């Protein structure tokens, strides 16, 4: 029988102080990794251990759980001399408090809690904060992007000077690209921010990222959707990346986010609270500019990753589920077309033609991540472009191509129109030049 | 001083680095041999909100505001895990086994599941802002002079980064020590013992742990914290006692300090003090409150059942001592002195490998001769176990003789091989013919047999087996 059920029948519940044989401590919730006859106890020295509850095990209730009253942080007064920044939480816990008594970690969302945890943000700006949703990065759906865009529009309407979106990092670059398309002609900066190290630890990158993001929201000149994350492994600068040109490039490092094929737009010096611009090629802050909110997207777009051994039949099958397909293509923009009639090679040309004929656009993006497609160089590229593949001379990331195709398909079904829109640089997702310095 | 009368109470926390190749939560080498860092990473630490309230946070915030931490990265010896740029890997199984062996040796209870915890540390010695630690055993004991010394807990944890330098709030740490498996053994309150005896208790803890053969012995690999109080005083924690042999002195000096304060009518403060090399202490900070711990959710709880099933608990030391006494016929005093060296377990390897050498000779060389070289020549013995085996091999084969041990080992310690040392010292073994020649020549000078033996022996010293030479003289009549 479940050990916690047995204890429950004895009137013992989680949080109570108990004695098990000679061990005294607080009964903790069970973690997912231990068996059902095991209870977890936080001993008086602070350590957790797991103990098997056997028939002969003596359990004694010593003290019922005390209601733990967390001190409520004080509210800060509104200061009309300071800019106002809205912080919207979409997921990923950028702030939390630890209850050492039980070892529990609670996420924080209220402005008071955020200011308590990061006093600097209160020094920089008046902070408005609220939670939109509390999602793991991987649970974020295109429908969520719409809600975020609408909420951002509301905040802009209310007259704030900048908006910070707290977001889990794994899919942050999808969201930033989507918001880029949905929130055009922004009057103020919209900044996505996250943390690669959990916020319960003193070393978390949350503070520098959030403080830099708030600083940029309050004072930054770039009125675009951007991502603000650590520039290097050092705790000194944050980089400001264009939302449509950024990608998470590392599973765990603080500086996981990199601008792809362009330089970051700016960097924030955390210590000096100073912004350094790295380009002039951006939309400037202008509170009088009228936001163009456009949340029409069609989420039925999928990615096919080409590889040796990949099956054309699978791509054909994808056509049953998706209304547009992005192919992560090799090199300059290739998938097998078997122009040499090799015995073993497979051609994707028939299925690509078939899908396009059905009205399903095929968009290429580089597997290499860095670099620009050029389908004029090899015959394979030329054949594919002629077949109607979209993407020649584009340097977008796979993720941005996916999001853009969703956006475009939210506006038209006409293949010519789709192609035209896709190849038009809407919010900086295609760079004009491939700079050597990168 | 009458320590019993003063109501001396002591608690020991003894830390040993484990002698395993890899770190506790990553595959970095735990052998700190790199000298120059390949990179330096700059970091800040920040307070984390907790139920401990705003004042606490404000204090931490102020403390950390003007402190920058610089971490020196060493090739092969630090990776993204130490840099807090990658989550911990699974715990080092060998380290876990050794820790559990130690827990067993101290008769500890072992939890069915071990949970790795994060202990909040904000001095920068851990890049993450916490130290990973886990209880592997609790409620244990061992016997000391017929008295039960209680062992309250045994933890396996990550060693912290060692401080390199500090200037104007910029603190430099070396990342190579961070993450080396460390075992902490905590005693209960020890009462009714003299400081010297408490030092022996620490020594016994070291010895019992050493039964695993996996305890590092270098300076800095063993560190003690000592809690001391006397009646009318307060508990004072003394951190960082680097040598076991300093414990009694540290206790004596602390008792003295507290007694004097009491005599002057001043209050003894609960505080943490740092041990200095001469055994005196200096104020470090007020005694911290309860440890701030919460679970390390990046590491799964460890089920001990499967590890314990195949865990061989090494022979406890008292058993080994018995065998040395009865099997190898070592005297009690010889065992005592062998225990004080780092060669206690090594002795048996040598004795087994080289049965032609009398065990007491091996023990004598390991416990006395090496010490004598250190004392007389004012050098440090740097001979590895392999090099010592080289010497004992030569002794076993009759290539060198025990009388020459001092001179040959001295030369070997300077870097010479056995052969080189023998040649240089003129200690090449004599042939029977050469021995006979020396006896004949000496006979011409002295006739008294006793005198003859004495002179011959001094002439052949270190170049032949004495008892064999005596036999030859006797047989010559």
Image (cartoon, coloured by chain):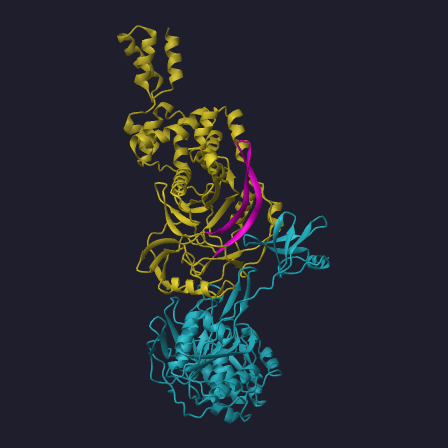
Chain colours: A cyan, B yellow
Query: Where does residue A142 sit, x and y in percent of width and height?
Result: 56, 82
Q: Residue at x 42, y 41 (%)?
A: B217
Which image quarter: residue A432? bottom left
Which image quarter: residue A147? bottom right
The outermost residue toward the front is B265
Relative to residue A282, is residue B329 drawn left or right? right
Residue B133 drawn in magenta: yes
Work out whether residue A287 or residue A361 is closer to the camera in this orientation and state it: A287
Vertical placement of residue A44 versus B330, above or below: below
Work out whether residue B62 or residue A417 is closer to the camera in this orientation and state it: B62
Residue A19 drawn in magenta: no
The outermost residue toward the left is B445
Which image quarter: residue B196? top left
Query: Where does residue B242 sit, x and y in percent of width and height?
Result: 39, 43
Work out whether residue A74 or residue A303 is closer to the camera in this orientation and state it: A74
Location of the C terminus of chain A (image quadrant): bottom left
Work out whether residue A378 or residue A413 is closer to the camera in this orientation and state it: A413
Q: Is residue A297 visible?
A: yes
Query: Where does residue A313 sit, x and y in percent of width and height?
Result: 60, 78
Q: Is residue A362 visible?
A: no
Q: Which residues are magenta?
A: B131-158
Location of the N terminus of chain A (image quadrant): bottom right
- Count the marks: 0
Vertical placement of residue A97 versus A42, above or below: below
Relative to residue B103, is residue B265 drawn left or right? left
Relative to residue A35, is residue A89 drawn left or right? left
Query: Where does residue B469 sit, x and y in percent of width and height?
Result: 37, 15
Relative to residue B373, is residue A398 drawn left or right? right
Q: What type of secondary structure mainly makes up the magenta span? A: strand
Vertical placement of residue B328 versus A8, above or below: above
């Amino acid at each position: 029988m479940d050990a916690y059920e047995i204890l429950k029948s004895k009137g013992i519940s989680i949080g109570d102080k108990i004695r098990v044989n000679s061990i005294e401590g607080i009964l903790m919730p069970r973690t997912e990794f231990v068996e059902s006859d095991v209870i977890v106890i936080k001993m008086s020295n602070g350590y957790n251990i797991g103990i098997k509850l056997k028939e002969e095990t003596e359990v004694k209730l010593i003290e019922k759980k005390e209601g733990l009253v967390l001190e409520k942080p004080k509210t800060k007064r509104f200061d009309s001399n300071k800019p106002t920044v809205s912080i919207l939480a979409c997921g990923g816990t950028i702030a939390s408090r630890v209850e050492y008594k039980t070892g529990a970690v609670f996420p924080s969302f209220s402005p008071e809690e955020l200011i308590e945890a990061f006093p600097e943000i209160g020094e920089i700006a008046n902070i408005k904060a609220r939670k939109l949703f509390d999602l793991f990065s991987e649970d974020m759906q295109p429908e969520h992007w719409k809600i975020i865009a609408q909420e951002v529009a509301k905040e802009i309407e209310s007259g704030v000077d900048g908006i910070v979106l707290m977001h889990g990092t794994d899919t942050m670059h999808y969201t930033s690209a989507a918001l880029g398309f949905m929130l055009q002609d922004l009057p103020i900066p919209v900044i996505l921010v996250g943390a690669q190290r959990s916020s319960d630890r003193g070393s978390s990158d949350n503070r520098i990222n959030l403080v830099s993001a708030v600083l940029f929201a309050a004072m930054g000149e770039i009125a675009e959707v951007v991502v603000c994350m650590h520039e290097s492994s050092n705790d000194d600068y944050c980089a400001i990346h264009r939302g449509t040109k950024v990608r998470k490039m590392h599973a765990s490092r603080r500086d996981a986010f990199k601008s792809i094929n362009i330089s970051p737009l700016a960097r924030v010096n955390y210590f000096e609270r100073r912004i350094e611009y790295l380009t002039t090629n951006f939309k400037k802050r202008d509170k009088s500019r009228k936001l163009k909110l456009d949340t029409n997207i069609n989420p039925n777009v999928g990615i096919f990753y080409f590889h040796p051994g990949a099956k054309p039949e699978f791509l054909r099958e994808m056509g049953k589920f998706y209304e547009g397909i992005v192919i992560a293509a090799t090199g300059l923009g290739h998938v097998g077309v078997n122009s040499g009639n090799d015995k073993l090679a497979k051609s994707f040309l028939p299925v690509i033609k078939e899908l396009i004929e059905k009205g399903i656009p095929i968009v290429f993006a580089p597997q290499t991540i860095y670099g620009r497609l050029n389908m004029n160089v090899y015959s394979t590229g030329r054949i594919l472009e002629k077949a109607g593949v979209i993407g020649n001379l584009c340097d977008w990331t796979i993720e941005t191509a996916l999001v853009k195709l969703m956006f475009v398909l939210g506006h038209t079904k006409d293949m010519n129109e789709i192609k035209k829109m896709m190849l038009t640089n809407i919010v900086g997702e295609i760079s004009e030049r491939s700079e050597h310095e990168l | 001083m009458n320590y019993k009368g003063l109501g001396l109470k002591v608690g020991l926390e003894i830390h040993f680095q484990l002698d395993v190749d890899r770190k506790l939560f990553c595959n970095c080498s735990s052998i700190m041999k790199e000298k120059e860092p390949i990179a330096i990473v700059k970091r800040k630490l920040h307070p984390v909100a907790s139920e401990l309230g705003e004042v606490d946070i404000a204090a931490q915030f102020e403390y950390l505001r003007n402190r920058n931490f610089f971490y020196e990265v060493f090739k092969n010896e630090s990776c993204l895990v130490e840099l807090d740029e990658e989550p911990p890997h699974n715990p080092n199984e060998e380290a876990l086994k050794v820790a559990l062996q130690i827990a067993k040796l101290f008769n500890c209870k072992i939890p069915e599941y071990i949970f790795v915890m994060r202990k909040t540390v904000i001095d920068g010695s851990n890049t993450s802002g916490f130290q990973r630690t886990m209880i592997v055993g609790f409620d244990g004991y061992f016997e000391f002079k017929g008295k039960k010394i209680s062992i309250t807990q045994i933890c396996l944890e990550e060693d912290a980064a060692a401080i390199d330098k500090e200037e104007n709030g910029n603190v430099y740490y070396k990342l190579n020590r961070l993450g080396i498996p460390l075992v902490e053994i905590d005693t209960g309150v020890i009462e009714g013992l003299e400081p010297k005896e408490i030092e022996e208790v620490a020594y016994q803890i070291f010895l019992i742990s050493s039964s695993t053969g996996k305890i590092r012995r270098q300076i800095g690999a063993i560190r003690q914290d000592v809690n001391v109080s006397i009646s009318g005083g307060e508990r004072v924690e003394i951190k960082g006692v680097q040598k076991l042999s300093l414990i009694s002195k540290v206790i004596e000096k602390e008792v003295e300090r507290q007694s004097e304060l009491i005599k002057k009518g001043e209050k003894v403060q609960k505080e943490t003090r740092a041990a200095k090399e001469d055994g005196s202490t200096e104020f470090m900070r007020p005694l911290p409150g309860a440890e701030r711990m919460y679970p390390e959710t990046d590491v799964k709880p460890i089920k001990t059942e499967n590890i314990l099933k195949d865990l061989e608990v090494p022979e406890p030391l008292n058993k080994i001592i018995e065998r040395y006494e009865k099997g190898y016929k070592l005297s009690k005093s010889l065992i005592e002195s062998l225990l004080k060296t780092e060669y206690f377990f090594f002795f048996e390897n040598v004795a087994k490998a080289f049965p032609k050498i009398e065990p007491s000779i091996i023990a004598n060389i390991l416990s006395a001769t090496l010490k004598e070289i250190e004392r007389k020549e004012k050098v440090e013995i740097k001979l590895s176990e392999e090099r010592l085996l080289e010497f004992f091999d030569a002794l076993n084969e009759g290539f060198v003789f025990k009388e020459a041990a001092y001179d040959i080992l001295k030369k070997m310690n300077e870097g010479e091989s056995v052969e080189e040392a023998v040649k240089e010292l003129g200690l090449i073994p004599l042939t029977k013919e050469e021995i006979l020649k020396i006896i004949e020549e000496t006979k011409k000078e002295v006739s008294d047999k006793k005198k003859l033996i004495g002179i011959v022996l001094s002439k052949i010293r270190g170049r032949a087996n004495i008892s064999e030479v005596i036999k030859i003289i006797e047989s010559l009549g």
